[in-house]
Image (cartoon, grey):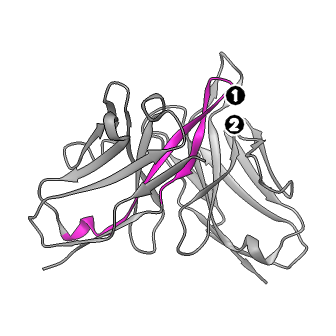
Amino acid sequence: EVQLVQSGAEMRKPGESLKISCKGSGYSFASSWIGWVRQMPGKGLEWMGIIYPGDSDAKYSPSFQGQVTFSVDKSISTAYLQWSSLKASDTAMYYCARLGRGSGLHRGFDYWGQGTLVTVSS
Amino acid sequence: DIVMTQSPDSLAVSLGERATINCKSSQSVLYSSNNKNYLAWYQQKPGQPPKLLIYWASARESGVPDRFSGSESGTDFTLTISNLQAEDVAVYHCQQYYTTPYTFGQGTKLEIK
């Protein structure tokens, strides 16, 4: 069974750093893109970017480029999303999701993590 | 960036009736090499992550009831929910995954009338 399990809720102060994780299981982790999606309280979904665990190739949304960093550790099938200096406006739910394939073609995010709630407040 | 615009923002439909949600892309999301629109629909219930319902604009994900269907006409896409059930109350999102950034629509909230 394919699963993406994310790390637990985090509370930080503005200016602090943070790294959250997303552990995949039940499939070949290195062979599927992993995406990150932000959902601010009461708002819609925002695509942050994707990373390919096989070679760590990453594509960022212009809205998030330079604000966050994606990374992976293939040896433990885990993807990471990190901030070096959080802002109050980073308060949101963050989801990881797998970019699925069908007949060799991409078909959207077919499996999602449960989400990690990040709260940034002084 | 490709802009995805959903309509309406919210709608209320009676149980057993049909719900129709629209999504328009600002440019084509059709891959000419395979003639597939790279457009997905997701359902998000309160407190849950999104769930993939439809991909390639009209292909139903495994396990999704056949009450859910997707259609396309150029850059206009439609999610139709027939015979609305109480468990269909959710926010529905469209997303293009044709080119990065893989943008989402703003979401449509579906309620029971």
**Is residue A11 shown above or below A29?**
below
Instruction: For label 1, count other residues whose C-alpha is less than 10 Å away and answer few (under 14), some (14-19) or many (20+).
Output: some
Q: Nearer the viewer, residue A103 or A59?
A: A103
**Is residue B12 shown above or below B67?**
below
**In the figure, is residue B23 to the left or right of B101?**
right
Tell me what residue is drawn at x 69 percent, y 36 percent.
B56
Residue beneath label 1, please?
Answer: B36
* Residue B52 x %, y %: 64, 51
Residue beneath label 2, please?
Answer: B56
Give the residue at the far bottom of this rendering: B113
- Quarter of the image for residue B34 reads top right
Q: Is residue B68 magenta?
A: no
Residues at marks 1 and 2, CA–CA distance in whole angstroms? 6 Å
Residue B4 is labelled as: none
Q: Nearer the viewer, residue B94 or B2?
A: B94
**In the figure, is residue A56 to the left or right of B97?**
left
**In the figure, is residue B82 to the left or right of A115?**
right
Q: Chain of mark 1?
A: B
- Quarter of the image for residue A122 reads bottom left
Magenta part of the chain: A88-113
- Whether label 1 touches label 2, CB < 8 Å: yes
Query: Does label 1 or label 2 sit earlier along the sequence?
Result: 1
Marker count (numbered): 2
